[in-house]
Amino acid sequence: MDYFLQQFINGLTLGGVYALVALGYTMVYGIIQLINFAHGEIFAAGGYMGVILLSFLAAHGLMETSPWLCLGLSMVLSMGYCAMLAMAVEKIAYKPLRHSSRLSVLLSALGMSIFLQNGLMLTQGVYDKAYPIGFTSGGFDIGTLHINYMQVIILGLTTALLLALNTLVYKTRIGKAMRATAQDKVMSALVGINSNRVIAVTFAIGAALAAAAGIMVGLYYGSVRYDMGFVPGIKAFAAAVLGGIGNITGAMIGGLIIGMVEIMAAAYIPHGGEYKDVFAFVILILVLYFMPTGIMGENVDDTRV
Amino acid sequence: MTRESRKFWLTLVIGLVWFLLLLWPLLGIKDDGTLTFAPAFAVWIRVAVTVIILACIYFAKQQGWLDPVLHPAAKAAGEVQKALLAPPLWIYVILGAAFAFAFPWLFSRYAQDIAVSVLIYITLGLGLNVVVGLCGLLDLGYIAFYGVGAYTYALLSLHYGLSFWLSLPVAATFAAIAGCIIGYPTLRMRGDYLAIVTLGFGEIIRIVLNNWMSLTNGPNGLLGIDAPAVLVPNFTHGFTLELFFMKKLQYLYYIALALAVVAIIAVRRLNFSRIGRAWEAIREDETAAELMGVNTFRFKLLAYAMGAVFGGLAGAFFSARMRFVSPESFTFIESALVLSMVVLGGMGSIPGIMLGAFALIALPEFFREFELYRMLAFGGAMTLMMLFRPAGLIPAKRMGKRSDDED
């Protein structure tokens, strides 16, 4: 039972991260029906910005005096950076193609993903880059259960970001504009919503969430790598599809399910650890085969396939 | 300056500043706590100058300032094209075939090595072209079939000593079966979902190859695969037939050439057959095709299987050439490479794919000092291609727009 609870916490942690990345996919898909392939790379860029900023702060000795402040600062800056990056990607690779075939947009996204990944490799090197500090060492025990600080950070921050996103989407003007654009682009443009701006903001928000996830994953595993975005990107997409793409609540649930399945499979199935990456793909295929609109239902206009 | 032109330059300047802001943190913030500007600025200034020059040319063209130069140039190009098209096509085909046949005598070992790679990729590109170019099913896991073919021959050769020639059809069959296995559950999906699911399948096959230690020896790969062999008569002791292993690159070149030629002829014949027309109908409008009596289920499955056959053949040749296989060779990036070949050259167009394979495999060899930037350039080229020439360098003659693409 303790073992199970421990794995449960691990699954929750991992699932929270997938959920954050999945939100970026789901929001973008909800509005412009595009799989933003470059999203995984933005997640990686977020992780890298975390390393760069934390190393910089650590070199100035700020890390010992106020680690939480440093973490907060680098997280905010990295989220801002990734938002800018995503807006640039959107402007270059997606905006000019808004009215061309979906195959073109998908290929353009794929090109952007390869471009960004190699850009990261060229500027940061091919080897793993280690985080200067980890929050994984400390922690507290509940009975025999051990929860480290990193898991607390991930769970706490994920919840906070999800609540913030929920407020943004359902309580603010821009959120209303986003929902309206997702429902009917032409109609919302007619009532005076600047759809280009809404799309840019959506990309920026999704990227900021991915950047936060990138830093947390980097801290959790202690290092980042230029190609770290690919597999989590696909898994997060699987999470978004599982929950019903375009559906924000669905993406969170989907992320938690994927994270949980992965951890449980690694813990309980023989050789499960070696094949852990397969499970997300298998879930993706099964969901698309049996429930093409996901668990929570697809939240995009149903004239599309 | 008109309003539009002012907007054009303003956007450009904002873009460049934005790019500097994105570039600087990556190059300028160091682990030891220093801030530097020189490396980021050095990269930035090169990009900025290139972009401004390109923008000037584009702007001048938009404004019509280049017309006096471009008009005669376009006219001359048109005349050259007309002159080139005057002799019948078979003359070019014969010239091309003669050149391809004489290639190993004309060029060095190094050039032959590249040529073999280009030929394998032409075969792969043509196989993927059946799926993507003709049938319009975006497949991001195509390299899995290449892997299936490669491992089939590797295992048959290692465990049963089966010859390359017997293994070729087996590898093709296994790849076709894999194609059907992947194709069957994905047939109900379209567009984006299909792309991501095929990607998932490709990854699954790679992970299985990587972890099934008892069969594939995992990440270490399989060593000691036989080269293709032929029986040659030997007259030293009367008349005997001896096994002769074609290990020399020259012989491998001819096998690769034969595979590529078979692929070219087969894909061409398929394209102009009833099956090819049905695929094109599915590509243009699946619903309409189905209403007109095309069995979309069977034809889409067939497209997957046919595409996979070429992947399998190329894979078997790959393991015979390298005499070594490991899962490293079948990553997603290889799929993306073959796909960008098809896209860059022109989907559905055979000369286009040959050009694409040449551009992506042979050209980087001439710029070896820029080796590191190769994938960066691929990515960039893929995006730019979609922006400026979505149909590719040599577009297929018959290409339409899917009805569900309409916005």
Image (cartoon, coloured by chain):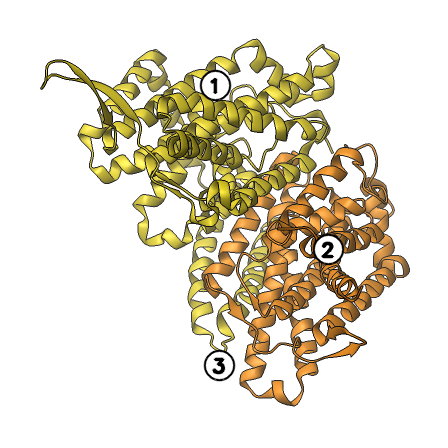
Q: Residue A192: percent from the left, percent from the top?
A: 84, 49
Residue A264: give its label: 2
Residue A116: quarter of image: bottom right
Q: Nearer the viewer, residue A148 or A77?
A: A148
Residue at image mark 1: B267
Mark 1 or mark 2, whichever is nearer to me: 2
Q: Residue A237: percent from the left, percent from the top?
A: 70, 48
Chain B rendering hue: yellow
Marks 2 and 3 in Cβ contact (< 8 Å): no
Chain ID, mark 2: A
Residue B32: give its label: 3
Q: Residue A39: percent from the left, percent from the top?
A: 65, 53
Q: Nearer the viewer, residue B130 or A195?
A: B130
Amino acid bearing label 3: Asp
Mark 1 neighbour class, 10 Å CA radius: few under 14, some 14 to 19, many 20 or more: many
Residue located farthest toward the bottom when viewing the structure as drawn: A65
Q: CA distance from mark 2 to mark 3?
A: 40 Å
Amino acid bearing label 2: Met
Q: Is residue A181 visible?
A: yes
Q: Is residue B64 left or right of residue B236?
A: right
Chain ID, mark 3: B
Mark 3 neighbour class, 10 Å CA radius: few under 14, some 14 to 19, many 20 or more: few
User: Could you confirm whether marks 1 and 2 are on the same chain?
Assistant: no
Q: CA distance from mark 1 to mark 3?
A: 57 Å
Chain A rendering hue: orange
Q: Nearer the viewer, residue A50 or B327?
A: B327
Badge 1 or badge 3: first in the primary sequence:
3
